[in-house]
Image (cartoon, helix red, strand yellow):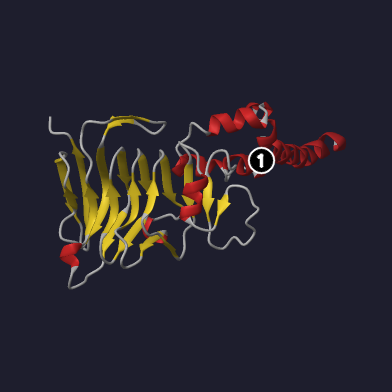
Amino acid sequence: MEEEEQKPAMTPGLNSNKRRKSRSGAPSFAPINNLDDGCLMHIFSFLSPIPDRYNTALVCHRWCYLACHPQLWLRVDRSVKDSSEPGVFPNIESAVSAARPGDTILIAAGGSHVTSNIQIKKPLCLIGGGELPDQTMLLCSRGSDSALEFHSTCKLSNLTVKTELGCCLLHRSGRLIIDGCILQCETDPLDYLSCPIVSTATGSKVVSSPIACHGNGVSVSQTRIEGGAEAVSISGDLALQRVRVICGRTSMFFWFDVECPS
């Protein structure tokens, strides 16, 4: 009887140890981890860079390595001093130059990235690495026509683009998608010369790219626009459509499209 009474006292401790071991070892025995690195990386390529692919990097060391692999996206980080590190660049211009069509460029948060008249002639996706768009700032120096000039289908997300004179974004052709960004024109006596978005595109060209397949145009969603003579200036044959504005206490958020009149 004494032996039988001692067994229950020992069993819970043993069971709890087994449960702890099974929990700690569970991720390594998940069926998906039986896939090789190439298969996992291919799966990750279908995820949206922010937040899904970013969140996969938090699972374990192996997933972090694969989710941040240069084949999936390039990184801009001003603090990186070793230029030999693959897929990491000190500035946006060099990252855009090295990128392949369809690449995603993750721009590190903190500080200001100087961007002046950078022409983008291939389909790319530029994403801010901060939790909020104002944590990743692209600063256009005075005297520049624009911070970024687009000649292909591209997407901007989670970024702040700031300019003193000129425009934040100059759209020449392709489909430009702006999602969850902040576009700021600094207050200046000549602010009537500045504009957050300028489009000179026409509606005739059809663009096919890994990001989208549309004619020329601009799509803006959940984006804060501040300063300048007007939110968007159009000099081509496109037209402003489907405008929606939500006014907050200190700012205004815009949704609109610039495309061929229907």
x then y, percent, for residue 3: 87, 36
Q: Which residue is mark 1?
A: 62
The answer to whether 158 appears left or right of 84 in the picture is left
**Is 208 left or right of 68, judged from the image as shown?**
left
Q: Looking at this view, is 156 or 37 the one in front?
A: 156
Q: Is residue 66 visible?
A: yes
Amino acid type assigned to the residue bearing label 1 in the image? Arg
Label 1 Cα neighbours within 10 Å, binned few <14 / some 14-19 / many ≥20: few
> Which quadrant would the C terminus be assigned to in this image?
top left
Is residue 158 at least partly visible in the picture? no
Residue drawn at x 28%, y 44% is 172
Residue 114 placed where, x, y %? 42, 63
Residue ID at (21%, 72%): 188
Viewer-side residue, 80 vs 43: 80
- Expressed as whole percent of the image width and height from the top left, the position of residue 189 reads 17, 73
How many marks the image carries: the answer is: 1
